[in-house]
Image (spheres, helix red, strand yellow):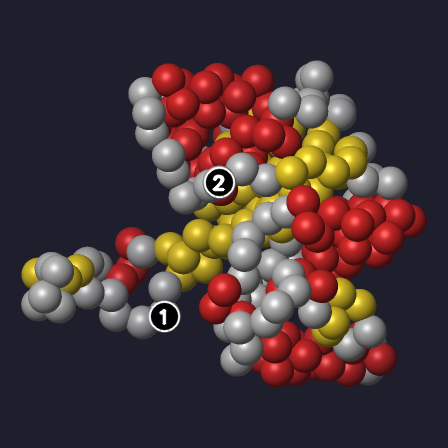
Amino acid sequence: MNNTAIILGAGSGTRMKCEKSKLLLELDGATVIERSVRAFFELPFINNIIVVCREEDREDFSSLLKPYGVTFCIGGSTRQGSVKNALKLIDNCDCVFIHDGARPLITAKEIEDTYNNTLKYGASAVGVPVKDTIKVVDGDGKILDTPDRSSLISIRTPQVFEFSEYKKALESAENKGLDFTDDCAVAESYGISVYVTLGEYDNIKITTPEDLPLALSIISRRESNDKNR
């Protein structure tokens, strides 16, 4: 098998309220982007890694990620555009793994479980059951509906697809003028069934300043658990 991981890191990170990319922030001695890339680099079934970044971050990313032999490409104006740019660099592969660079706490087990489900079903994404009650509201904030929480899943990454099918799905979306913020939605729009792989709540996305102490707490707990084994 020949598999490629695409690590998306071209976001502006406005909500983090920092001048540099949030992926360059350090978490216990390693940057966010290093932790995300390392999670895939250490897996035997990942053959290639493509990191999507902004032009202004490329030099910093290249310096940090030199030991991992990654390929770089510049992101598009949207998430879908960034994935499209990365896919152009892939001549052929069996499965493509699409992961948020801002999710540095992804575990090897989650990645492998999602991969195995993709081999079984053709497409899979990490998700966790929703804990809160979700409301559907109108533009004024009026509650319109309360979906059954037992059927709701919070989708995360990685999202893994058969490369040839996902490429067709992305081309189809582009031809129809559709632009999705979720990779699964691209596949779904083409009729591809995507199956959920239950993951861990620890797989948080570094989005706002409040996420940093939470991430450090998770890292500390994991290190403590490893020492006690």
Which quadrant holds residue 6? top right
Which of the numbered marks, if any, corresponds to residue 29?
A: none
Label 2, on which residue? 77
17 lies left or right of 54: left
> Disc 2 vs disc 1: Cβ atoms closer than 8 Å?
no
Label 1, on which residue? 131
Q: Position of residue 16 (x, y in %)?
A: 53, 70
Q: Work out which quarter of the rendered image holds the C terminus and state it.
A: bottom right
| Front one among 140 and 201 | 140
Q: Position of residue 25 (x, y in %)?
A: 70, 69
Q: Position of residue 203 (x, y in %)?
A: 58, 63
Q: Residue visible at 53% across and 21% down? A: 167
Residue 19 appears in view: yes
Q: Nearer the viewer, mark 2 or mark 1?
A: 2
Q: Residue furthest right?
A: 67
Q: Work out which quarter of the rendered image holds the N terminus and state it.
A: top right
Which quadrant holds residue 13? bottom right
